Amino acid sequence: IWSATLSRHSICMIPPQKLVPPALMGSSALRFASTETAGLPESVSTKELVDLPDIPAAPTPPAFSLEDVSTDVLNAAGEATFASIGLGGWSPVGIVQNCMEFLHCTWELPWWGAIAVGTLAVRTIIFPLVILAQRNSAKMNNNMPQMQLLQLKMTEARQSGNAIESARYAQEMMLFMRDKGVNPLKNMIVPLAQAPLFISFFMGLRQMANTPVDSMRDGGLWWFQDLTLADPFYILPLITSATLYLTIEIGTDSARLSAANMNTMKYVLRALPLVIFPFTMNFPAAILTYWACSNFISLGQVAVL
C-alpha cells in the first residue's frame, strides 16, 4: 500500500508533457527534445581546469599621509590656505591675494598690517613714475604761456579757414614741446599705472571679505576689528573721503590749474569725495583700509615733491 501511494505521488509530480508517449508527440516537440541539451558541453577536461591563468595581485593603495593633507589645506599660521577656499591664483587679483596671504602668514602680520604694508610696497614701486609725471607737469607749467600762445594762433588760423597757417603753428607747437622735453601723455602715466592696481586690490580684498577669510573677522584695528564688514561708525568712509579731498586739493594746487578752462575740472575733482561717500559706507573695512592707506601715501608723496 505504501509503495502504491508513493508511486501515485511520484506520477503526480511528473509534468504533463513528460507523460506524453513519444508516439503521440509531434515532430516539433521531438526536434526540441533532441536539441535541448545540444549546446551544453558533455565534459570538461582536467587540463582545462588546471591551466587557468593566475589571478593578478591586488594593486597597492597609494600612500596616505595626514601631514601632506594638512600641508595642502593649512598654511603656516594654521589657517585654511587661500587655494583651499578658492582664492589666489595667477590673475592680477589672485596675485594680490597671494601677496596678502604671504605677508600675513610668513611675516605674521595682522590683516590690517598686511594690507598697509602691501599698499606701501606697491606705491613705492610706482613712485619713480610719480616723479616722472611731476617733472613733466612742472615743465608744462613753466612753458604754459608760450604753448597757450601757439595754441591760440593755431585756433585762429583754423577758424579763419587758413589750413596752411594752422598746420604751421601745429608744427611749431610740436617742435617747441620736443625742445623743452614736454609731453602731455606723460601726465597720464600715474593714473594708467594706478588704475589696474586699485582695481586688483579692490576686487581681491572684496573677495577675501565675502568668502570670507575667517581670520579677517578679528584682523582689524581699534573700532573696526572685523575687516569683512562695513564700518558701523562710518569713520573709515569719512577718513577715505577726507584724505581723497586733500590729495585732490593739494594736487591741483601743485599743478597750478588756475586757467579758466581748468576751473571746471577743479570743481569736478573737488566734488568727487562727496559723490563716492554714500557708496563707500557699505564697503568692507578691508577695502577702506587699503584706500585710506593709499590716500595717506599720496599725501606724503605730494608733500615730498
Image (spheres, rainbow, N blue to C red):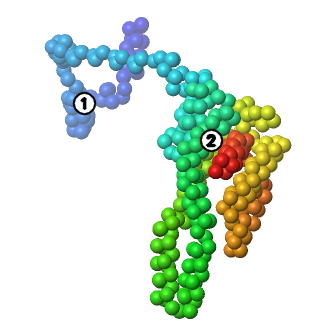
Mark identifier at residue 119 = 2
Q: Tell me if residue 165 comes above or below residue 41 in the rendering.
A: below
Q: Position of residue 55 (x, y in %)?
A: 27, 16
Gap in angstroms between the C-alphas marked 2 and 1 = 88 Å
Amino acid tagged 1: Glu
Image quadrant where one finds the N terminus: top left
Please indicate whether residue 241 sits to the left or right of residue 138 in the image. Answer: right
Q: Position of residue 250 (x, y in %)?
A: 72, 56
Nearest to N terminus: mark 2 or mark 1: 1
SS state under label 1: loop
SS state under label 2: helix
Residue drawn at x 69%, y 43% as measured from the top left: 293
Amino acid tagged 2: Thr
**Corner quadrant of residue 208:** top right
Residue 86 visible? The answer is no
Residue drawn at x 58%, y 87% as measured from the top left: 156
Q: Are marks 2 and 1 in contact (CB under 8 Å)?
A: no
Tell how many labels: 2
Q: Tell me if residue 286 comes above or below residue 163 in the rendering.
A: above
Q: Position of residue 199 (x, y in %)?
A: 60, 51
The residue beneath circle 1 is 36
